[in-house]
Image: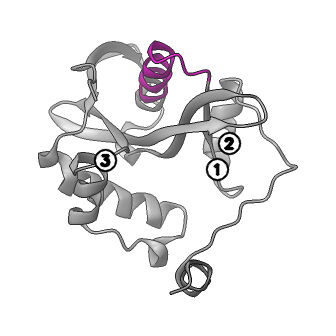
Amino acid sequence: MSRPCGIRYRTAVFLESMDLEIRDARPVDVARILEMMRDFADFVGLRDYLTISDQRLDMAVFGEGAFVELLVAVRQNTIAGYAMFYPHFSSFRGERGYYLEDIYVDEGSRRSGVGLALLRAIARRAAERGFERIDFQVLKSNTGALHFYERLGAESNDQECRFRFAGGAFARLAGK
């Protein structure tokens, strides 16, 4: 899959400017991204559910048959945020899009345009591929993120409930 090399932004932050690079993640970035995933899990109170290893993340993004895309936001030579997403299809609307699995910005870089730059890079990539939407979920307790997305015009749908088959339920369903 061909991917853009990277997008550079100049963002105003409290009257000072900063350089911000949005680029595809590289295998060398996996350890830092995993560290940020731990911070994200702590932030939303889901650390007990975080079981991914660096090998599994590496395989999901860079391995054979990988379909997960991962962007990083780099400022001052440090990864300040990441976004993980993959293609999906809305059957009722017949629309292709991305499902945004995670977007996280480290605490020191929040409110500086990093999250918006990541979202814009995903939207541009989606538009280039003829996609029409970005879908995602937000925990109701993450009020900062809820307000951020609402300010950008994202729509929520209270008519849907999220389900999953995992662990024993998945094994039973798969007949294992």
Q: SS for tag 2?
A: helix
| Residue furthest out toward the front | 175
The numbered mark, 1 or 3, whose residue comes first in the sequence reads 3
Q: SS for tag 1?
A: loop
How far apart marks 2 and 1 lie (CA) works out to 7 Å
On screen, residue 42 above or below 79: below
Image position, residue 1 (x, y; %): 28, 29
Location of mark 3 (residue): 66
Residue type beneath disc 3: Ala
| Quarter of image, res 13 | top left
Q: Nearer the viewer, mark 2 or mark 1?
A: 1
Q: Nearer the viewer, mark 1 or mark 3?
A: 3
Residue type beneath disc 2: Leu
Q: Nearer the viewer, residue 170 or 8?
A: 170
Question: CB under 8 Å between callouts 2 and 1?
Answer: yes
The numbered mark, 2 or 1, whose residue comes first in the sequence reads 1
Location of mark 1 (residue): 138
Q: Residue at x 17, y 40 (%)?
A: 26
Q: Residue at x 66, y 27 (%)?
A: 95
How far apart marks 1 and 3 lie (CA) works out to 25 Å
Location of mark 2 (residue): 146
Badge 3 crowding class, 10 Å Cα cut-off, few under 14, some 14 to 19, many 20 or more, is few
Q: Nearer the viewer, residue 62 or 152?
A: 62
Question: CB under 8 Å between callouts 3 and 2?
Answer: no
Q: Which residues are magenta?
A: 118-132
| Quarter of image, res 70 | top left
Q: Residue at x 32, y 14 (%)?
A: 9
Image position, residue 167 (x, y; %): 53, 82
Q: Nearer the viewer, mark 3 or mark 2?
A: 3
Badge 1 crowding class, 10 Å Cα cut-off, few under 14, some 14 to 19, many 20 or more, is some
Residue type beneath disc 1: Val
Q: Residue at x 44, y 13 (%)?
A: 128
